[in-house]
Structures are given as C-alpha cells and as structure tokens.
Image: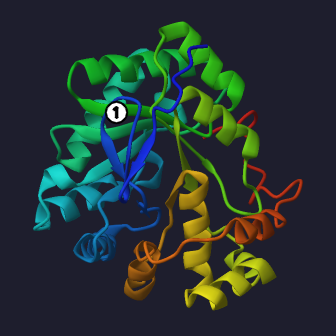
C-alpha cells in the first residue's frame, strides 16, 4: 500500500486534498431534500455560504442539487458537488454509466468529487468500480475521486490494485464513534476524512452530554457548534444535514471557536464500543 504523508493541508476554512484540489471544511448533507422544497433548502444554503454539497444516487437528490446550483448566483467554480455510486452500479461498465447518468441529473460538465458509496464486499466489484472512477477522472468527467465507508482492507485492495490513493473516505464519525484507527490510517495515507452524521442521529443525547454542554457554555457557542468544531480540530470535514436556516448558519459559524486540549480530551470520553448509529458495518452492509 502506498503512503502519502501530510497530503491533506488545512488552510483557512478549506483543505487541500492529495490531488492538489481544495475542498471546504464543512459540507451540507442533502439526504431527503427532494422536490421544490429540496431545491429551496439547497439554494438557501448556498446563499448562507455553503460551498460543499453532498448528494448520492441513493439519496435521489442529484436533480435538486443540480437545479439549486444552476439557479444560484454563486459561480459554479466555487461549488464542490459530491455524489456517490450505489451497489447496483458496481463494476467497471456499470460505474462508468453511473457517472454519466449523475452528470446528466446534476446538469454539470464535471463532478467535483465522486465516491463509491459502500464497498459491498460480498458483491466483490469495488476494485473494478474504483478503476472506473480512475478512468472517468482521466476522461475529465470527475475532478477528484474517493470512497465512503471503506475499511482498511478495502482501501488496501484498491490502492494495491491501481496505485491510486483515494482523496477522501467519508465514514460515520461523531464523538460517540470517533474512529481513531481509521483516522490514523487516513493521515498516514494522506486521505481526507469526512464525517457523515457528524452530530449523531441521536443528537439529543450527544448535544446534551456534559463535556459538550460545558464547552458550549464556556465559549458562548451552541452544543452543535462544539461538536462540529471537534470535527475540524481532529481533521475531519463534517457533513451536517439541516433544512433549518438558523441551524445552517450556526453550523458554518465555527471560526470563533477553538477547543482546548482539555475540552477535546473530555469529549473523547464519550466514545464507547458498539456506538454505531444503526449497525452500519461496511463488511456486511449492502447498499
């Protein structure tokens, strides 16, 4: 397995990936943002400053995200749009077709970041799917390529087979499930960690936790801001999902926060075994 140390650099609210491209330090999840309402939510997020939009074939929100981008006054080159390949499109030819279909639904000339959504190891096609993304990038259909929910052995296989290290691995990540080993591997390989469900689906329990509440009171911030700042300081790009305008603004307003080592250590005590949100083990999930 190749090693690319120090390939991810945090520079003033953006991070530089191992392929030299930049990505915002906070993104917007778009699961469930369908129809005109979904377009309105994403359009509003762009007005409020979001520049990283996270969709997927499996979310069925690519059309809404694409329409919001086209109708926005934000220049297209300032927006990073991410989408993902689902299980039924694994395999080289199917994945190439999936990329073209995503381009059509999004209405863009190039996808900024394309991920394999889940490895689906029992299907056994994620290496060929990865080869398809490498080829689509070479053909100019994609700018950056990465994966989602890949364990160490999945990463090793695609890197050894192709010599191509993913720019991103998007994984479940929050203080209840901080994934220290995965993040350490990502740092060694130069892969950016993104966190889905960064506030936890059981957000009430997390946001009411004593270390989070204490830090929020100390800094004059909300508990959600503390958790999202925790992501930033451990080197993760959080992808919170919110349809509420006030929460969208709050989730972006993190630059005034700087958690101390003691606060980070206190938040680390929230971790525990078996803290996945719904048992989403990439070795067995089929999506």
Q: Can residue 116 be seen in this view?
A: yes
From the viewer's side, name the closer residue of 163 and 276: 163
Percent x, y for residue 48?
Answer: 28, 77
Is 42 situated above or below 218? Answer: above
Query: In percent of the image, x 70 and y 65: which residue is there?
Result: 261
Horizontal relation, residue 273 to residue 163: left or right: right
Q: Can residue 119 be seen in this view?
A: no
Horizontal relation, residue 176 to residue 166: left or right: right
Is 203 situated above or below 219? Answer: above
Rendering quarter of residue 154: top right
Query: In percent of the image, x 29 and y 22: which residue is there?
Result: 136
Q: Which secondary structure, mark 1? A: strand
Horizontal relation, residue 161 to residue 212: left or right: left
Q: Read off the residue under disc 1.
A: 144
Percent x, y for residue 140?
Answer: 20, 25
**Quarter holding the C terminus?**
top right
């Amino acid at each position: 397995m190749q090693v690319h140390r120090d390939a991810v650099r945090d520079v003033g609210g953006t991070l530089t990936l191992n392929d030299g491209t930049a990505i915002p330090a906070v993104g917007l999840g778009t699961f469930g943002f369908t129809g005109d309402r979904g377009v309105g939510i994403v359009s509003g997020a762009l007005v409020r400053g979001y520049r990283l939009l996270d969709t997927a074939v499996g979310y069925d929100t690519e059309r809404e995200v694409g329409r919001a981008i086209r109708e926005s006054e934000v220049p297209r080159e300032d927006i990073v749009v991410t989408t993902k390949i689902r299980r039924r499109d694994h395999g080289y030819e199917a994945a190439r077709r999936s990329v073209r279909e995503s381009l059509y639904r999004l209405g863009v000339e190039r996808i900024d970041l394309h991920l394999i959504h889940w490895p689906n190891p029992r299907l056994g096609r994620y290496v060929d799917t990865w080869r398809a993304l490498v080829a689509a990038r070479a053909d100019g259909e994609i700018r950056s390529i990465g994966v989602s929910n890949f364990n160490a052995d999945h990463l090793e296989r695609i890197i050894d087979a192709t010599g191509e290290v993913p720019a991103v691995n998007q994984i479940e990540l929050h203080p209840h499930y901080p994934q220290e080993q995965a993040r350490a591997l990502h740092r060694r390989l130069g892969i950016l960690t993104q966190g889905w469900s960064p506030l936890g689906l059981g957000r009430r329990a997390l946001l009411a936790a004593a270390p989070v509440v204490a830090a929020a009171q100390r800094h004059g911030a909300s508990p959600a801001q503390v958790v999202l700042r925790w992501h930033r300081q451990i080197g993760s790009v959080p992808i919170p999902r919110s349809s509420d305008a006030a929460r969208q603004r709050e989730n972006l307003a993190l630059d005034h926060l700087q958690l101390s080592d003691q606060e980070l250590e206190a938040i680390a005590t929230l971790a525990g075994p078996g803290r996945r949100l719904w048992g989403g083990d990439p070795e067995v999930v089929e999506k």
